[in-house]
Amino acid sequence: MPIYFSEHEVVLPGQLLSDNGKRSGEGTYSIGGKVYAAQIGFASIKNNKVVVIPFKSAYKPSPGDRVIGIISDVKPNGFEVDLGGYLTGMIRIPDREEVVNMNLKVGDVVYVKIRESGLGGIIIDKRDRIRKIQSGLLIHIHPAKINRLIGRRGSMINMIKKLTGCEILVGKNGLIVINGPTPKHEFAAMKAIEMVENEAHTSGLTERVEKYLKELLEKG
Amino acid sequence: MAFVPRKSLTAKIMRDKIYNLLLQGRRIDGRGPRDLRSISIQTNLLAKADGSALVSMGSTKILTGIKVEVGSPFPDRPDEGIFTVNAELLPLASTTFEPGPPDERGVELARVVDRSLREGGVIDLKKLCLVEGEKVYVIFIDIYVLDYDGNYFDPSLISALAALATARIPKYEIVDGKPQKTGEFFTLELNSLPFTVTVGIIGEKFLVDPQIEEEKVLDVSMIMGTDEKGNITCIQKNSPGQIPLSLMDEILETVLEKTGEIRRKFLQEVPVKLAEQST
Amino acid sequence: MEKPERLIDENGRRVDGRRFDELRPIKMEIGVLDKSDGSAYVEFGGTKVIAAVFGPREAHPRHLALPDRAILNCRYHMTSFSVEERKPLGMTRREVELSKVIREALETVTFLEEFPRASIDVYIEVIQADGGTRTTGLTAASLALADAGIPMADLIAAVAVGKVNGQLVLDLCDIEDKYGEADMPVAMAPRFNSIVLLQLNGRMTPDEFRRGLALAQKGISEIYKLQREALKKKFSSIPPTET
C-alpha cells in the first residue's frame, strides 16, 4: 500500500498517511478511502495496519494491564480505585465482611491488575492478590511514555533499578512508586524517570539516562 | 461559596514519605526545608496594561496587570488615590480551579495581597490625588494565576509589587473640569517592599514555599510577610489545622530571612524607585 | 484611540504598513504551562493568547456527562488589562458567545467518542488584545489539543478578514476592526477544505464575501503551515541537551 510517511517522521493530526483506508489502526482514522493521523507521534505499520504511536495519549485500560491506583471509595460491595485521568476501576467483593477484613481505606495506594474494561466499566482482578503499597514515593508520568520507560525487554527500567538500587513499581496508567535504600537514591530514580518522560521521543536515550544517573549518584 | 475540588485524591504514602524526608532535612524535589524555588520576574510585557509582571516560582506562574483610571475618591479620604486588588485562579492553571467568579480562594488571595500592600504602606496614596475631593488616580491591580504548582500567594505579591514598581502611569490633568491624559507618564515611588513566605507544617516540622504535592499533605499552612525594616506586614493562616505555638519563633525567624532573600532577588531584577526612608 | 484619517494609504499600505494580504508577525510556542495536559501560546502581531487543555477527565458536574462521548467545554476569556479600557472581572456576553462558537469549531474535529462520560476542557486566555482574538485563540486551542494528545481529525487554523476603506484585508488589527466596515472571522480544518467557524460583523456584498473567503483561505494555509512547524519543532528528535 502506498504510504506517505517515513520511519522517524513526526506526524501530525490531519496528516495523510496512506491510500488504503481499510488498514487504519490506533492513532489514525480513515475517511474517503485514505488514512490520516489523529494524534502527534511516530507512524509505522503494525500487523499490516498503519498506526500512530502518540507522544501523549490518555491511558486506555486493557485486560491484563498492571496499574497503580488510589482507593477513592469504600462501598459495601467493594472498592473504587482512582486510576488517574477520568478512569475509576472497581474491585468487586460481594462479601461485606471480606471488604472490612481487607482493610483498605480511602487514600491507600494499590498495585492491581485489570480484568476487564468496557461497557461494564473497569473491573479489577481480585483473585490476583491486590497489593497494598505500604510506603514509597508516588509519582506520575504521561501514560504514553510508560513503554519507553520500560524499554525493550525492560532494558531502561532495569538499568534505572540496578543503578539506583530502588524497587520501582510501574503502572501502565502512568503512576509509579519508588522505594529505595536512601532518599538520594530515590531522588535519582525520580529524576531519571523525569528525563525519560521529557525525552521519550529522542534516540540514544538509554545511554544518556545512564550517564545522568551515574553523575547524580556520584554527587551528594 | 464553598469550594468543591475536582477529585484530587491524596495518597497516604505520600504524606509519610514527605514527612520522613523532612525529618532528614530533605524534600521530594531535592530542596531543603528552608529553600525557596527559583524565582523569575519579567516586567512590562503587555502594551495595553499600564504595568505588568510575570513571575514564576518554580512552575507556579502568576501574571499581574495594572490599569489606571481617574475616579472619585472615597468621601472619608478626599485627598487620597485608590487602589484595589483582584485575583483570579484561572481554570487554565490547575485541575482544581473551576471557571466562574472567584471562589473563596481567589477572594482570599486578593485580600491578603491587598492587606500586604495597604498595611505595608507601599503606595503613597496622597501623591495620587488630582483634585482634592473630586478626582483621584484609581489603580487596579489584577492578578491571574496561570499555572499552579503550589503556593500562589508569595509569587502573586511579588508580581503585584513588580508591576507597581515598573508601571508607566499616564499623567492626567483637568481641562474644562474633565480629566485628560497629558501624554506624559510617571512611575510610582514605593515606600516599602513587603514580601510574604508561605510556610507548610507537617507534624513538628515546617517547610517554606510548598509545591503542590507537599500542599496536599500539609497539616496546616500559613503565610507571613515582613518588610525591609523587619515589621510583620501580613499573617494569614490559610488552611484548616493546628499551628503548634512552639514553632512560632522559628517560623518568624525563617520568614524574616526568606523575605530578605526575595527582596534581594527583587532588587536585582526590578528597577524600583524607593521613596526616601525617613526614620 | 482616535480614528485615523485613512486606514489604507495611496500605496495600498495599511496603518501598520502591511499590504492587504499580509499576515502580522506570528509566534507559536507549544507546551508553555506545566500543569495542564496541553498548552500553547500564540501571537498574531499585538494579540497574545494562551490556551490550555485538561482532558480527558471526569465530567464535572457528573450529571452533565454524556453516555457515549466526551463533552468538550470551552472558555474564551480576556484579562482585565488585555484591552485599552479595563475589562471588569467575570464573563461578558461577548465572551460567552465567543466561547460557544469556538467550542463548536473544536468539537467538529475532535474524536469525542473515544472518551464516553469524560470532559475535555479548553481554556483560552487573551492577555493582550489587538484584533482577531477569537481566531488567535482558536488557533492556539487547536495546538493545545494536539499537545495534549487528544485525537483530532485535523488542526484548526483561523484568521479574520475585514473590509477597510472599501478594501478587503487579511488579519485585522484592532484599529481596522474598530473603524472598518466589516469583520469576518473564519476558521478551517484545512485538510478537508471545510469551514468550522464563520461569522460576520458588518456588511459585505456577495462578491466581497466570496473574495473574502478566498483571502481567508490564503492566510489560513500559511497559518496551518506555521502550526505544523511549531508542533514538529516541539517534538523533534534532537535531544534537548544537545541543541
Image (cartoon, rainbow, N blue to C red):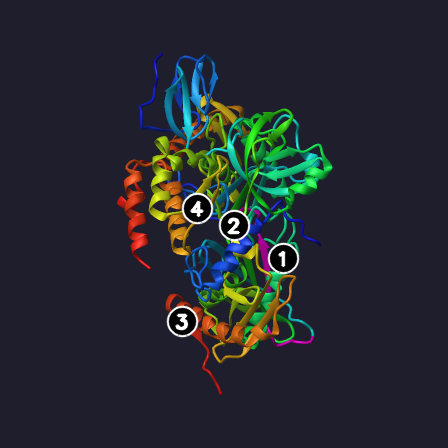
Residue B151 location in percent, x, y? 53, 59
Q: Is residue B178 visible?
A: no
Task: Specify whether disc 3 shares its chain with disc 4.
Answer: no
Q: Quadrant of the C terminus of chain C?
A: top left
| Disc 3 + disc 4, Cβ < 8 Å | no
Label 2 amino acid? Ser
Residue A196 against residue B114 in the figure, above or below: above
What label does residue A135 carry, if any? 2
Q: Secondary structure at mark 2?
A: loop
Q: Chain of mark 2?
A: A
Using the numbered discs, state the Cα–Cα distance from disc 1 to disc 3 in whole angstroms: 29 Å
Q: CA distance from mark 4 to mark 1?
A: 24 Å
Q: Dot 3: what SS?
A: helix
Report the residue at 31% width, 36% height from top. Answer: C237
How far apart, in angstroms, are the residues tagged by discs 3 and 2? 40 Å
Q: Which residue is mark 3?
A: B264
In the displayed structure image, the side of residue B131 where residue B58 appears, left or right: left
Q: Is residue B79 magenta?
A: yes
Callouts 1 and 3 in the same chain: yes
Is residue A191 left or right of B247 when viewed as pictured?
A: left
Question: What kind of element bears circle 1?
Answer: helix
Question: Mark 4 falls on what kind of element?
Answer: loop
Per the model, the C-alpha gap separating discs 2 and 4 is 33 Å
Label 1 environment density (alpha carbons within 10 Å; few <14, some 14–19, many ≥20)? some
Question: Which mark is drawn over residue B105?
Answer: 1
Residue linked to disc 4:
C32
